[in-house]
Amino acid sequence: MANTISKAFVQQFQDNLIHLASQKGSRLRASVTEQSVTGEKFNFERLGNVAAVVKSSRHTNTPVLEVPHSRRTATMTDYHWADLIDDEDKVRMLISPESNYAKSGANSMARAFDDLIIAAATGNAVDGSGTNVALPAGQKIAHGSAGLTLAKLISTKEILDGNEVDEEERFFVLGSQQVSNLLNTTEVKSADYNSIKALVQGDIDTFMGFKFLRSERLNLNSTQRKCFAFTKGAMGLGIGKDVSTKIDLRPDKSYAHQVYLSFVAGATRIQDECVVEVLCTES
């Protein structure tokens, strides 16, 4: 009977996991460029710009313009999560979409995806030759002993605009205290800006061209929270194996049932010009 339970419940548990993940899953995964990957590493290809040349006469030679090509490499990492369930009644509860086991597993996987993306956004990227590439100083906004201010948002927009970054699909990742900073800003409080107040209810809204994504997993160094803005094309997520689920009997654990989830993925910053690090002071 125990083996039958394992086989019968695994597909329903997998379906429930996906259902939960679509509602309470990663807050950042849908905002980055995603690729399926085979192997330990994956290269995101980058093409630079070349200016057009003047055609000075009729029948002139066709110019050969070499477009600069470079790469950013994402290394695949294995992630997994497991729990043991002794009581058969609890095993039966695995089929429920509200199962605590399904919720816990789905949320754990979602947080791992967000951690990957956050670490890659402002950390060192790796180019095609294996060299670490830091985010340039010109793509960083100092904390200035202040939280998230309107001036910092304006500066962030100015940096992206100055780099001729596409105005579509711009995102800003911030923490709960930065949301409070914005809500306490005079301009944001006014009726002309009050769409951002939807953040209080946890909704994603847009302000100054940015779609805000709240995350409590951003790096906090002493009193400095590292927020960042980016575009979808700036960040790459390689998926070697998406989240999979197994439920197996463990004879070595008094025949308890083990719920096991895993995935293989890696992330990297593809375009430095499209990412801006914004340090914010938290009191």
Image (spheres, rainbow, N blue to C red):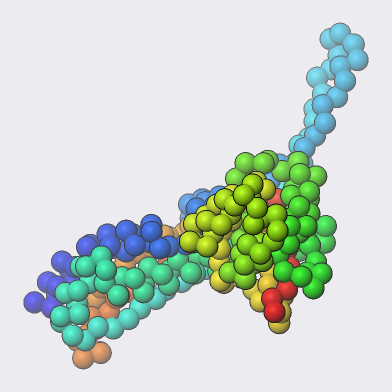
The one nearer the camera, 128 or 142, is 142
- Count of numbered circles on the image: 0
Q: Residue furthest left?
A: 1
Q: Which residue is at the front of the view, 59 or 215?
A: 215
Residue 173, percent across and down? Answer: 61, 61
Q: Residue at x 68, y 72 (%)?
A: 225
Above or below 273: residue 267 = below
* Residue at 19% over, 77% down: 91
- Name the residue at 24% across, 76% down: 248
Asked whether the viewer can see residue 272, the reply is no
Image position of 41 (left or right of 98): right
Residue farthest top in this picture? 58
Residue at the outermost front position: 191
Q: Residue 236: x percent and y percent?
A: 59, 54
Residues 114 and 225: in front is: 225
The image quadrant that residue 222 belongs to is bottom right
Query: Which part of the image, by quadrant, shows the N terminus?
Result: bottom left
Residue 86: in sight, yes or no? yes
> Quadrant of residue 102 in the image?
bottom left
Q: Quadrant of the C terminus?
A: bottom right
Residue 130 in which image quadrant: bottom right
**Picture layout, residue 272 above or below residue 6:** above
Q: Nearer the viewer, residue 166 or 213?
A: 213
Horizontal placement of 243 versus 203: left or right?
A: left
- For image coordinates 33% across by 59% down, the residue present is 18
Instruction: Measuring from the top left, give residue 239's x and y in whole percent.
Output: 48, 57
- Residue 158 in percent (x, y) is at 78, 48
103 is higher (above) or lower (below) than 38: below
